[in-house]
């Protein structure tokens, strides 16, 4: 006999209330479940590094308008990054775009492409002021290297890959920083953006070569490279992208007003620790290569 509609409905209600428990799984008969074993956490550094570059790393053709290559390491304490930096970037996106899938890209903002088509100059200035404020209030330490490609090409004995040279300088300085923080024995992740199969393969080989002992101490460095897809919506990678070009311009055109770099001065790793914020960072948190004849690389 066909079950009445109201009975079927009632059965459904009963099953919903009981979450479809099987007879043997009733509270009185459910077997005790042994607690899961405690898995020891792998100790890792308190810091994470996001990396981006500005300029072409090739030497075959040097752009006369931007003949430098700048590599920027943004070093974040994970707690501050997760609790303050990421929420600030997310709220900024919701405010200006209505969603958080937009990727903040310095080139697109500067050229007003895609999502970054501003109503007028006043709108753009307000947008940049707020974004600059977020960068200013975010606590991170900057390590950067700017390669003068024209001068490097004249000194071919120093090698032919500006990215690899800058990477070596930055990783060595990063090791000094993690040592200062007491993290030199813990693995620290360095996140870089994918650029292409060959480029990524070459970069990983150079990264591992430096960390395996091809550094000025001849010792192992505790860094782990992580490749992120270009579409990865990482707040850290976006901040690294935003700071790289202002650093390059500060070396290329030191007398030109550079509001973004003025904000970054206090973030560079500097001699004497944080007591010397914004002072004595050249040659430490910011390295320029090749050096003038009167200087030698540290």
Image (tube, grey):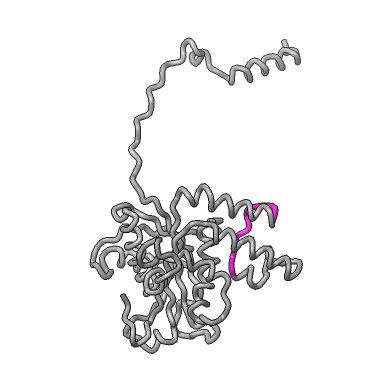
Q: Is residue 36 above or below residue 94?
A: above
Q: Is residue 198 visible?
A: no
Where residue 222 appears, as percent x and y from the top left, is: 31, 57
Q: Is residue 26 left or right of residue 107?
A: left
Residue 119 is left or right of residue 182, and the answer is: right
Compared to residue 168, the image places residue 34 above or below, namely above
Residue 167, quarter of the rendered image: bottom left
Query: Which quadrant holds the C terminus?
Result: bottom left
Residue 99 forms part of the magenta stretch: yes
Q: Quadrant of residue 21?
A: top right
Q: Is residue 210 left or right of residue 97?
A: left
Residue at screen point 31% across, 53% down: 182
Residue 65: x and y, percent?
55, 84
**Which residue is more in the foreground, 65 or 246?**
246
Which residue lies most toward the front here?
275
**Residue located 59% across and 63% down the image:** 132
| In magenta stretch: residue 52 | no
Depth order, front residue of 188/294: 294
Q: Nearer the viewer, residue 242 or 213?
A: 242
Q: Is residue 79 above or below residue 70?
A: above
Residue 38 in the image: state x and y as whole percent: 35, 32
Q: Which quadrant is the N terminus positioned in?
A: top right
Count of numbered labels shown in the rendering: 0
Question: Residue 178's x, y, as percent?
Answer: 34, 58
Residue 184 in view of the camera: yes
Majority SS type along the magenta span: loop
Q: Residue drawn at (59%, 17%), measured in percent from left and top? A: 18
Q: Residue furthest bottom?
A: 154
Q: Which residues are magenta?
A: 97-106
Residue at left 41%, top 59%? 190
């Amino acid at each position: 006999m066909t079950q009445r509609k109201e009975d079927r409905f009632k059965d459904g209600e009963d099953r919903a209330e009981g979450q479809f428990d099987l007879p043997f799984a009733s509270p009185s008969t459910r077997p005790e479940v042994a607690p899961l074993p405690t898995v020891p956490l792998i100790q890792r550094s308190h810091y994470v590094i996001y990396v981006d570059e500005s300029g072409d790393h090739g030497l075959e053709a040097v752009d006369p308008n931007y003949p430098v290559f700048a590599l920027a390491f943004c070093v974040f304490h994970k707690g501050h990054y997760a609790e303050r930096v990421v929420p600030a970037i997310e709220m900024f996106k919701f405010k200006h775009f209505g969603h958080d899938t937009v990727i903040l890209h310095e080139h697109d903002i500067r050229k007003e492409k895609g999502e970054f088509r501003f109503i007028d100059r006043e709108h753009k200035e307000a947008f940049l002021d707020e974004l600059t404020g977020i960068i200013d209030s975010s606590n991170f330490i900057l390590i950067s290297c700017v390669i003068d490609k024209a001068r490097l090409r004249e000194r071919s004995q120093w090698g032919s890959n500006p990215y690899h040279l800058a990477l070596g300088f930055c990783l060595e300085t990063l090791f000094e920083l993690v040592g200062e923080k007491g993290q030199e024995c813990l693995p620290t992740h360095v996140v870089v953006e994918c650029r292409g199969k060959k480029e990524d393969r070459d970069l990983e080989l150079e990264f591992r070569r430096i960390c395996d002992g091809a550094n000025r101490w001849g010792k192992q460095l505790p860094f782990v490279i992580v490749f992120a897809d270009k579409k990865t919506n990482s707040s850290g990678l976006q901040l690294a992208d935003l700071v790289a070009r202002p650093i390059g311009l500060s070396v290329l055109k030191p007398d030109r007003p550079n509001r973004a770099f003025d904000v970054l001065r206090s973030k560079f790793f500097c001699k004497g620790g944080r007591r010397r914020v914004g002072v004595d960072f050249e040659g430490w948190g910011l390295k320029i290569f090749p050096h003038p004849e009167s200087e030698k690389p540290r």
